[in-house]
Image: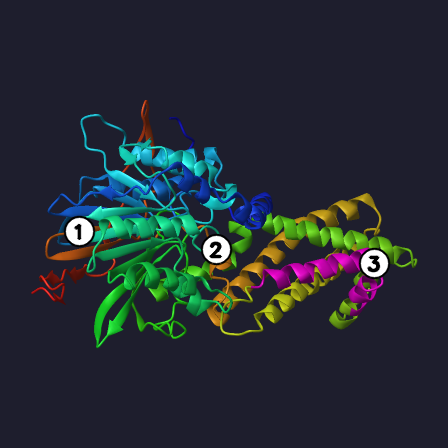
Amino acid sequence: MQFTPQKMVGWYQVKQLMFTGLKAILSSIFGNYSDRREIQAALSGPDMFDFSQQDELWFDYVADIGDGFNSTFSIASLLAQAHLRLDDNLTHRGSILLMGGDQVYPTPEMHEYENRMKGPYQAAFPACSDQTSPALFAIPGNHDWYDGLTNFLKIFCQERHIGQWQTHQKRSYWAVKLPHRHWIWGIDIQLNSDIDQPQKNYFADIIQQHMQPGDRVILCTAEPSWVFKDRYRQNDSYERLRFFEKRFILDNQFELVATLSGDLHHYSRYAKMVNGKETLQRITAGGGGAFLHPTHNLNKQLRKVKDENLDLKAVFPKKETSRRLGLQNFLFPFLNPSFSFFLGAFYLLLTWVLETDASRGLTSLLERLGSTDHLLSAFDAFFHVLIRSPLAFMLGLGLLAGFTWFADANAGKSRYTWIVGTLHGGSHLLVCSLLIWGFATVNLRYLNLEVISPPQVVLFALEMGLLGSVAGGVLVGLYLLLSNLVLGIHDNEAFSALQEEDYKNFLRFHLTPTQLTIYPVGIREIQKHWEPLGTQPQTFKGTLPEAHLIEAPIRLPIPIRVKDSTAVASS
């Protein structure tokens, strides 16, 4: 399969914003009416995938992968290596690869899957008949769901190869049996909705037919609801997750060892503390290739998660690094020229409407502003025309409403962050008036151009188009920077603007008769210079990025099970 390597998704490209927003709206409206999980259940039985015959097993977990080629291929290449040395630990390629959601960005068209996920993974680990094929299991994230799961099912649920990795699942959720009474469950939460009844029936059948009290479960879900519970005021995904965990895991006397998630594109590990000891691990590892999310707004303790005592044990990147990276929002107009140019064009349109309506009163707005030396007089003239022009007023109101809606009012430290959004919108009107005043002063007073002369019209359009774009972009970047660092909001918006390729991660697991070990793998700098080699198959040459342990391996001893099913810690 031939594919075209892609750059990181430009989330602030106007066309991209509109297209992705439309997809998200349509999928949220019609998702429940076209829920393909029910069709999956009708067409296949309760498959259980058995890897329990081995004495020890290596397996990998990666999430949020299908973005820019450099980051995605860097991670895929590391996953494909037969051996990977992490500090003093020699690790082995996983016999199973788990993909934890959002296998493609920005939307799940087939060409996006091929260019952003399938192609890079096939190039990193080309199919070879004389090698064992590691198994691949995936759960969908919200970006996989934007087409109703159509292409996800084609890629992951038809027993196809992705390079040397072999898919096995028939559904978007699954249960995998591991050695030493361990299980991995992958659940499909659709677009932040309840787990459907056929999926509940599936796990109930797995429990009844294959499991026994004392078994240990690693749960994969598409979003870190424990973090969302703490960060957002109106999010009940944690309650739904806890319901599932209690009903299907804890009430059946299974042990929940760890919950794995992506969706947030960083590494964070929370541990449930019982009598000063770590028990349940809640790990977010969404560093498979998508833009970086910040870590500096994660709380040390999740106080809103009242039924669990969850303490933050490690993050990657470090919080001070995360804050430093956020300062790049000062460069917003240069990192996101499309959106910045849109703002400049909006300022120009608003000026044109204001000038047209003001000219009906014989004196143009530009002439009024160009003749005053006082800032307050300039503001007074601008807003005097604005509130008397129906079209200009609607444009200004739309700008205010847009930035008020843009404010991340469901997160952060205040219930009134929407006010900050309104002030942000108002500041754009102030900047627009300042720009008109400045350009009018230069063009009319110092260059002595006539307000309606072609040279002045062209010059003003160029000034507003260029300097207005820069000023508008700087204002958005400053808003994102301050709101993220001070109010703790706009994690997604502030860092998607940066398109940060570095600071990626994945998890490597090693299961033995005595313990389960988790190796959190970090990559500070991905390889950005891959040289194309062959086309059959399509391959690339480059130095592998340096991988390291984010923190010391997490070692979870396996209890010794005696005949009466009582568990004591192994020594």
Amino acid at dot 2: Ser
**Disc 1 to disc 3: CB gap under 8 Å:** no
Amino acid at dot 1: His
Give me the residue at 24% from left, 60% from top.
254
Question: Percent x, y for residue 521?
Answer: 25, 53
| Label 2 Cα neighbours within 10 Å, binned few <14 / some 14-19 / many ≥20 | some
Marks 1/3: CA distance? 67 Å
Q: Which residue is mark 1?
A: 510
Question: Which sits in the foreground, 233 or 411?
Answer: 233
The residues colored magenta run 380-407
Q: Earlier in the sequence, mark 1 or mark 2?
A: 2
473 relative to 345 in the view: left or right: left
Q: Earlier in the sequence, mark 3 or mark 2?
A: 2
Amino acid at dot 3: Pro
Marks 3/2: CA distance? 42 Å
Question: Percent x, y for residue 548?
Answer: 23, 53
Residue 9 in sight: no
Element type where label 2 sits in the image: loop
Element type where label 1 sits in the image: strand
Q: Residue furthest left?
A: 571
| Label 1 Cα neighbours within 10 Å, binned few <14 / some 14-19 / many ≥20 | some
518 relative to 315 in the view: left or right: left
228 relative to 558 in the view: left or right: right
Q: Which residue is mark 2?
A: 193
Question: Which sits in the foreground, 465 or 10?
Answer: 10
Residue 390, labelled with which disc?
A: 3
User: In the rendered view, would you say 68 is above or below 392?
Assistant: above
Q: Earlier in the sequence, mark 1 or mark 3?
A: 3
Task: Considering the whole magenta stretch, tell me its main secondary structure.
Answer: helix
